[in-house]
Amino acid sequence: MKPILIVAVSLAVAVSATWDGNLNYGSPSRRHPSLGIDVPKIAKRSLQTRTSWDPAELNFTHGVASGDPYPDSVILWTRISPTLSNDSSNKTVEGNVPLYNHDTETYIKASPKPVCVEYQVGTDKNFSVVADRGTAYTTSDIDFTVKIEAKNLSPFTTYYYQFAVCGSSNKSPLGRTKTSPRADDDVSKIGLAVYSCSNYPNGYFNAYGNAARKDKVDFVVSPALDELIPADIRITFLMSSVDYRTRIAQYRTDLDLLLSHRQFAWIPVWDDHEVSNNGYRDGSSNLNNTEDSFHKDGGISVDQRKMNAVRAYFEWMPIRQVDMDDNLRIWRSFSMGKLLDLVMLDTRNYDRSITTLGWNDEYVAAIKDDAGRTLMGSHQENWFYNQLSKSSERGAVWRIVGNQIVFSRINNTARSSDGEWLNADQWDGYTASRNRTLSHLYSHSIPNTIFLAGDSHANWVSDLVWLDTKPYDQSTGAGSIGVEFAGTAVSSSGFGGTIASANSKSKGLVKDNRELQWSEGYYRGYYELQIAKEQIQASYYGCPTVATRNPFEISLANFTVRAGENRLQRNVANGSVESGALQRGDVKQTNLTLDTETGTWNVTMFDQMFIKY
């Protein structure tokens, strides 16, 4: 009789639960057949079963997460499921879906039974003051994910939250989050940790955990997120919804990534690998709108593959869908007091003109200056310029632009026997889009603009300049309109080789690009921004190794941008960095050795820069 009593209690509590309370039933869109979910049908199906899960059968398989903070609300996420395996409901009907259990190497049938989840948000870990609470359903139709908007919150305030199976003691890990300030709040300082490109087969995501352990920032920003590359032989290419769900779920098992999601509110956008390498509006390097491509890839079209990827992304990320009728729109903005506006762009998937695909590089290089080429599409591009202008007009001190790819010109004659080396997959391949952006900044005298970038798997710090159009003094920075901070990868491969060989490449880069003030491509890591009214301090960190899970990091370089100067403060990085190459300055070249018996790293110089927690 005990199981029956548990079910009865669970159903009684679930009466007040709602389907609409779980945002994943409406995200990213109910208006498109390939993405929409018939919620009334799911509700009717669940009523017909008249059963619910025994709480003991369910597990919070991937921790908790939060994101997209507003002054009065924040998105909370979790997954509560009877299995670690991911649902393939896009392949069958009515939830009668085979799920593969990798542990037992058997198939199990997904049940239409719903899971009732309750949540609470409080100002302390004991929830002595509850700011918001509620209940919601989830089912296999959305991979047992839960995404809710916690409301009635106060601006720029830390909160704790927790999920539980309705009417039971089965609880999720405790999460921490933070709301953003109101647009007119007088905020003195905001800290951001900035990440790019985590590659599961390449190593551990130590960088995520290091910022969480230091706990010196308010939010995590990821202008280029995961490289969803298969790590085993079961999935060669990601095509279906279950492929993308499985890959995201695998990445979300990394312990340091779990820690970061549990401790900070994230503000992410996707990179190309959330769909496919080097994507554009009509395809990618592996799948294009051709008959051969369609047949080769099992009858999956470019649009269907994108829809599968988008559906899985919005199911698994703590992110708002700001336009329900535009399922590819991920670009959005956040006003954080009078201090800054954070503008998050999509320079990868939204209406982007053709990019380099491995077989057309010469063609794209030839058309890179074409005025008709667009990196963002006209809709997003016009919105972007309006955001910059509105931010300046309202008097925000800083404009922080999160985009996936390096904005500044990157040439390197040392990498090409024919002269200049071009990466046309970056803004270099869309010079008309870059020129329009620079023209808007210069012509409207918009100050204090900071571009954030990723994807390149290396560190780049540049003055933001319009070369050959506006005068620029590389020694003083005069003529610059802003600064670009681009970060290395969490674990994806960089320049490779030794520190010496990587630094040699960096020397060639700073030699060939006078606006590029620092280049570094050996270390995996991240950077933090401490943003104040007077200045922004950028601190870059490198992980000695990602071959093991460890909490070590090295302080690579520090940079300052003072308000109103629109350039990097000289001496850049105080004239000294730990690795890479400066336009002017010294490289310290710390000597690191690994003690294989103890698993610890020894530093023979500058030991004070080596941090252990």
Image (tube, grey):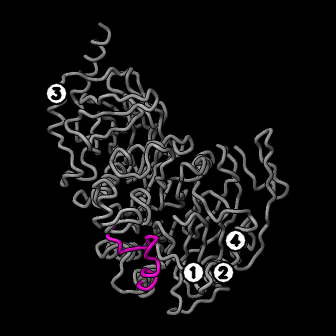
In the rendered structure, are the residues bearing label 3 and label 1 in contact, judged by CB atoms less than 8 Å apart? Answer: no
Q: Which residue is mark 2?
A: 414
CA separation in Å, label 2 and label 1? 8 Å
Q: Earlier in the sequence, mark 4 or mark 1?
A: 1
- Tell me, for residue 490, which label it has, or none: none
Q: In the image, residue 604 lies at what x, y percent?
A: 85, 55
For label 4, the SS is: helix
Q: Which residue is mark 4?
A: 573
Q: Which residue is mark 1?
A: 421
Q: Earlier in the sequence, mark 3 or mark 1?
A: 3
Frontmost of labels 3 and 2 is 2
Q: Is residue 103 shown left or right of residue 471?
A: left
Q: Earlier in the sequence, mark 3 or mark 2?
A: 3
Q: Earlier in the sequence, mark 2 or mark 4?
A: 2
Q: Amino acid at mark 1?
A: Trp
- Compared with 3, 498 (above or below) is below
Q: Amino acid at mark 2?
A: Ala
Q: Amino acid at mark 3?
A: Leu
In the rendered structure, are the residues bearing label 4 and label 1 in contact, judged by CB atoms less than 8 Å apart? Answer: no
In the rendered structure, are the residues bearing label 2 and label 1 in contact, judged by CB atoms less than 8 Å apart? Answer: yes
Residue name at image x 62 percent, y 57 percent? 525
Q: Which residue is mark 3?
A: 47
Res 490 → quadrant: bottom right
In the rendered structure, are the residues bearing label 3 and label 2 in contact, judged by CB atoms less than 8 Å apart? Answer: no
For label 2, the SS is: helix
Q: In the image, residue 564 lies at what x, y percent?
A: 54, 78
CA separation in Å, label 3 and label 2? 67 Å
- Mark 2 neighbour density, 10 Å: few (under 14) some (14–19) many (20 or more): some
In this view, the residue in front, 15 or 40, is 40
Q: Which residues are magenta?
A: 349-367
